[in-house]
Image: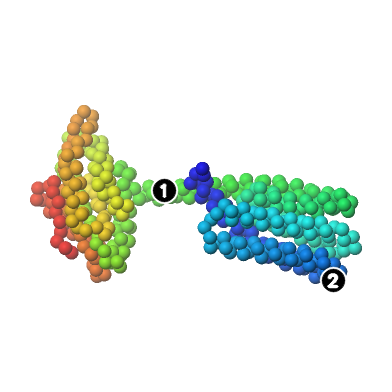
């Protein structure tokens, strides 16, 4: 079974192959038309020319049509097989066609054009199909081998046959080398993208608790606020603060305080676990939770569950049991276009302040904004 990495790279390679080959498809019929009509070869050999043109135009049209349909359809292994087979068939049609030209002893000018086009199309095709080594080699064989065999065995044109053989071998080495370079570059690009994503992920995470940091919260809240205004859906902020946290640090040490914040994080994540719930560390021992499109009664129940869960929780640290509570401030509204999101955060903060001043270990809810 392919890993996610392999699937991503395979998809990228197939996409590269198709993009690289699209431009070159029409060069085959154009080049052949120049060869056949520039010196009136078509008039001297009408039957051969006609069949050669029909085959080459036919396979070119088929490849263009298949690529167009391939973009419309879901990626399928059969489509990939058809694509690769059509590439080999294109090379084979040209290669066999050139082999036929080698028998035209009186057509030196046309043969020269065909040699030039064959070498050029082979070079361009092999380079285009570098992402897949076997396709590049298969195309090289299909376009070069028929003519090379004809030159050496049937027409006894040894100098040109040897040159074609050397060129054929050279293209094999080039295909192998460039394929390695392509895959090395692709692998490095993938690793760089993953590293960039990881750095971006880390830049959005709090270093101690691993949850989202204030920077990420600010970005997400700004986006969700606009969405809530546009869709007229409710948005809720729940701010919570650890009660007497300084006392925890002073009595048990800052390491114990850090462990307590980690435990609190796990509790909050277990309760606010919808995909759209954003639990963030807002600063110090203060956390903020963004809840989208949820009725206030449901949020109240979740907030109370969080409060009681923390109240009952005990952190065992160096043979000591650490317990404390949290205070929570809740703000809930369906925002209007003229409302400022900063003021909404201030209302949630004010609710938290009220919870702290009224005795802690409780939830205060702001009036409807």
Q: Quadrant of the C terminus?
A: bottom left
Q: For the residues marked 2 and 1, what is the alpha-carbon distance in whole angstroms?
A: 67 Å
| Label 1 element class | helix
Q: Is residue 159 visible?
A: no
Sooner in the amino-acid sequence: mark 2 or mark 1: 2
Residues at marks 2 and 1 touching, judged by CB atoms closer than 8 Å = no
Relative vertical location of residue 254 with respect to residue 40 in this rendering, above or below: above
| Label 2 element class | helix
Q: Nearer the viewer, residue 265 or 192?
A: 265
Q: Position of residue 72 (x, y in %)?
A: 53, 63
Q: Nearer the viewer, residue 297 or 27?
A: 297
Q: In percent of the image, x 59 and y 47: which residue is there? A: 183
Q: In percent of the image, x 40 and y 50: which residue is there? A: 200
Residue ID for mark 2: 43
Nearer mark to the viewer, of 2 and 1: 2
81 relative position to 311: left or right: right
Residue ID for mark 1: 199
């Amino acid at each position: 079974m392919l890993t996610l990495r392999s699937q991503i790279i395979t998809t990228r390679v197939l996409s590269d192959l198709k993009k690289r080959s699209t431009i070159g498809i029409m060069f085959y019929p154009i080049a052949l038309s120049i060869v056949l009509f520039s010196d009136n070869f078509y008039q001297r050999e009408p039957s051969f020319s006609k069949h050669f043109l029909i085959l080459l135009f036919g396979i070119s049209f088929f490849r263009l049509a298949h690529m167009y349909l391939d973009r419309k359809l879901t990626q399928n292994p059969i489509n990939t097989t058809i694509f690769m087979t059509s590439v080999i068939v294109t090379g084979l049609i040209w290669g066999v066609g050139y082999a036929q030209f080698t028998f035209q002893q009186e057509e030196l000018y046309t043969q020269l054009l065909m040699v030039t086009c064959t070498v050029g199309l082979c070079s361009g095709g092999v380079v285009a199909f570098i992402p897949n080594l076997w396709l590049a080699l298969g195309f090289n064989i299909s376009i070069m081998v028929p003519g090379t065999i004809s030159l050496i065995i049937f027409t006894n044109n040894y100098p040109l046959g040897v040159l074609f053989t050397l060129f054929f071998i050279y293209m094999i080495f080039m295909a192998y080398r460039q394929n390695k370079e392509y895959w090395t570059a692709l692998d490095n690009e993938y690793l760089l993208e993953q590293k960039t994503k990881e750095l971006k992920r880390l830049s959005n995470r709090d270093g101690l608790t691993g949850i989202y940091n204030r920077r990420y919260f600010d970005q997400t809240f700004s986006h969700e606020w606009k969405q809530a205004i546009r869709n007229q859906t409710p948005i809720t902020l729940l701010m919570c603060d650890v009660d007497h946290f300084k006392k925890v640090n002073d009595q048990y040490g800052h390491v114990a305080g850090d462990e307590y914040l980690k435990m609190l994080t796990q509790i909050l994540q277990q309760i606010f676990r919808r995909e759209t719930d954003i639990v963030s560390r807002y600063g110090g021992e203060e956390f903020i939770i963004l809840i989208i499109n949820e009725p206030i009664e449901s949020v109240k129940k979740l907030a109370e569950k969080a409060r009681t869960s923390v109240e009952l929780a005990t952190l065992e640290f160096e043979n000591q049991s650490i317990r404390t509570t949290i205070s929570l401030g809740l703000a809930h509204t369906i925002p209007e276009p003229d409302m400022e999101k900063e003021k909404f955060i201030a209302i949630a903060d004010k609710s938290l302040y009220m919870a702290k001043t009224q005795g802690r270990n409780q939830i205060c809810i702001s009036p409807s904004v």
